[in-house]
Amino acid sequence: MTPTSQTLWIRAPRACSDARAAGGVVIRDSRIVEAVPAGGTPVTPIGETFDASAHVLLPGLVNTHHHFYQTLTRAYSPALNKELFPWLTTLYDVWANLTERQLALASELAMVELLMSGCTTVADHHYVFSGALESAIDVQVETANRLGVRAALTRGSMSVGRDDGGLPPQSVVQDEATILDESRRLIDAHHQRGDGAMTTIALAPCSPFSVSRELMQESARLAEEKDVRLHTHLAETEDETAYCQRLFGMRPLDYLEASGWLGPRTWLAHGIHFTDQEVARLGQAGTGIAHCPSSNMVLGSGMCRTLELEAAGCPVGLAVDGSASNDHSNLAEEMRQALLLGRLRYAPSRVTHDDVIRWATQGSAACLGRTDIGGLAPGQQADLALFRLDEARFSGAENPVAALLLCGAHRADRVMVAGRWRIEEGRPRDLDLDALLARHDQAARELRGSV
């Protein structure tokens, strides 16, 4: 085999989260073709080499739940210091005024922020649709394509407004037929299949307190027909449990199962308030859980039973959740939060940095139904995050991989998606970040001023 410029060896990293790739990885086009052992050299002929001796090498991080538009309402004074339901009712009236331009800026900023934190696959749950936001998901697809980031975009929805006992205002509620027709169109237009897919579409009715039972059932049928995944918020708070029992006469998981959602096609955001028996049922079904530690702490929602869920058979992934309940889009920082919260719930010996990195990579990929991302094995996609340890916070660290979490890594130095560098020296390529920040901040001011 003749070496070509498309064959790149990420050579001899300072440390690697996968010992089998301690000598680096070889990339050809968009895939990893070889994992090099410590002290070894590639068998594959090499065209180019990147010296990674100053970097810690991880698979690209995978985010499993977000609300990009919420970057416009971070640290919003009227919503501070509230639990989920009053927090939502305060913010819904702001979000109802979103414009397409504001959503585009919010989505771009969130994706860039995730990329800079080492995240190569972003997920978003957009469910606010007014007359001004009819093309919201199309806008997000275009933005992801332009930035070169892998995106799992979910067509969210709300069909039960305040007039019918729900939480959202009527201006962002749609009827079931409109939601299902638009969901079908988006799948046909944008959903990619197979290894290397850059854009996927899932169906994501928002939550039990904002959609009808009929929409949940019909979404499950459409997802099976189109072979796409399902996503929703579930078991986030005790208020939600009480709501489901009052309205449906059953607990949230029973309602989910009765709607045809309990299975391996589904991944759930938060998944906090499950009984032992419910954890076992989720594991048997292979339903995934997007763990959102910062958001759960900000809203005082509770602590996800990550270890029990994973032991039962659930894929457990990591997520930043919306930037109005976090309030950042930084998956590297979210790993540290997951580590600390896990040790508070369990014990230091039971939740290690390796566990959390697994959640943020392999576990998150499994939640999204993918095996081609989240690792450094030959055949997987060349999605990589490389971190330097040259900040004051890392000085004196003995274990470089553990230091990423314990010392608080927050920005990757280099990020590769599908074999192409998207972040270099901590900043996005081919993008004026300062100009984006200025436009985004102005859009946030405009949105707040619309209330």
Image: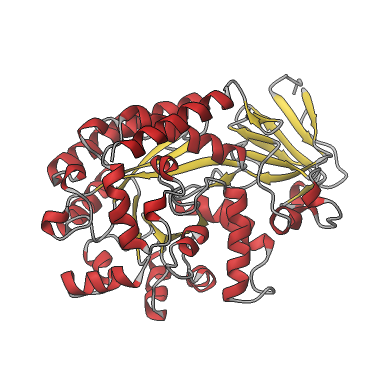
| Nearer to me, 317 or 107 | 107
Q: Quadrant of the C terminus?
A: top left
Percent position (x, y) of residue 53? Answer: 84, 39
Who's the residue at 77% across and 51% down the image? 393
Would you place residue 334 above or below residue 442 in this image?
below
Would you place residue 434 above or below residue 445 in this image?
above
Would you place residue 283 above or below residue 382 in this image?
below
Colour setting: secondary structure
Residue at the far bottom in the pictured view: 276
Residue 156 appears in the picture as rendered: no
Residue 3 appears in the picture as rendered: yes
- Which quadrant holds residue 102? top left
Percent position (x, y) of residue 127? Answer: 29, 45
Image position of 350 (left or right of 54): left
- Which quadrant holds residue 307? bottom right
Image position of 109 (left or right of 34): left
Image position of 433 (left or right of 128): right
Percent position (x, y) of residue 109? Answer: 49, 34
Percent position (x, y) of residue 100? Answer: 32, 29
What number of labels is visible?
0
Q: Quadrant of the N terminus?
A: top right
Who's the residue at 48% across and 24% down the image? 146
